[in-house]
Image (cartoon, rainbow, N blue to C red):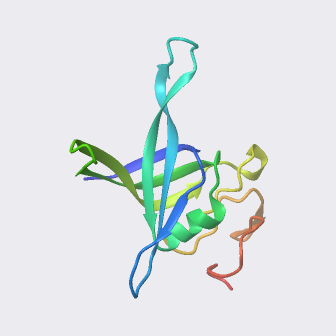
């Protein structure tokens, strides 16, 4: 089974590109800084982090472009994909990327992030700060009505 779940902060805004051809698709690349559990830097005692590259496609990439920004804490799940290529010096460079299946905000509004809302694998709104009862949630600021299941 190839499944990974990560929580980390965006190192910088996602880079968005569009594929060529008739059926152009958005492709987002971004890097998460994920703290290593229980490990501390020997010099200053600060947690150490791994910088993990993530790639999302289609609607997930468009979501990343629109809502994800440097410093946000994100929860990402997907699969690991490895590869290699020859650089200009003829050396083999090995790559490891997370192919994103789902991405969500991990901070609530009051913690400086946006909210815990995901539109990555289909229309979904959840984890907002205010539960209005009867299964309804307050829609986070900046979320457009398009793509929500009840519009």
| Residue at point 64%, 78% (across, down) | 148
Residue 101 percent coordinates (x, y): 42, 62
Relative to 10, say whether 145 is above or below. Answer: below
Q: Picture coordinates of residue 29 (x, y %)?
A: 47, 57
Compared across the picture, whether 17 is left or right of 1 comes to right
In front here: 28 or 72? 28
> Going 43% across and 48% down the picture, which residue do you hit?
53
Look at 68% across and 70% down and name the residue there: 135
Percent position of residue 62, x then y: 55, 70
Quadrant location of the C terminus in the rendered image: bottom right
Q: Residue furthest top?
A: 43
In this view of the protein, can residue 51 be seen by the observer?
yes
Q: Position of residue 131 (x, y in %)?
A: 75, 62
Foreground: 25 or 59? 25
- For image coordinates 75% across by 68% down, the residue present is 142
Q: Is residue 126 visible?
A: no
């Amino acid at each position: 089974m190839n499944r990974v779940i990560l929580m980390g902060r965006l190192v910088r805004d996602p880079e968005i590109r569009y594929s060529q051809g008739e059926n152009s698709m958005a492709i987002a690349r971004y890097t998460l800084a994920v703290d290593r559990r229980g490990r501390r830097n020997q010099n200053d005692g600060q947690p150490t982090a791994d910088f993990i590259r993530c790639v999302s496609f289609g609607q997930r990439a468009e979501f990343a472009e629109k809502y994800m920004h440097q410093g946000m804490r994100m929860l990402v799940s997907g699969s690991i994909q490895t590869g290699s290529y020859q650089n200009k010096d003829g050396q083999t460079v090995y790559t490891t990327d997370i192919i994103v299946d789902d991405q969500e905000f991990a901070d609530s509004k009051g913690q400086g992030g946006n909210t815990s809302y995901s539109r990555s694998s289909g229309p979904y709104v959840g984890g907002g700060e205010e539960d209005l009862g009867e299964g309804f949630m307050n829609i986070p600021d900046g979320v457009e009505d398009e793509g929500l299941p009840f519009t």
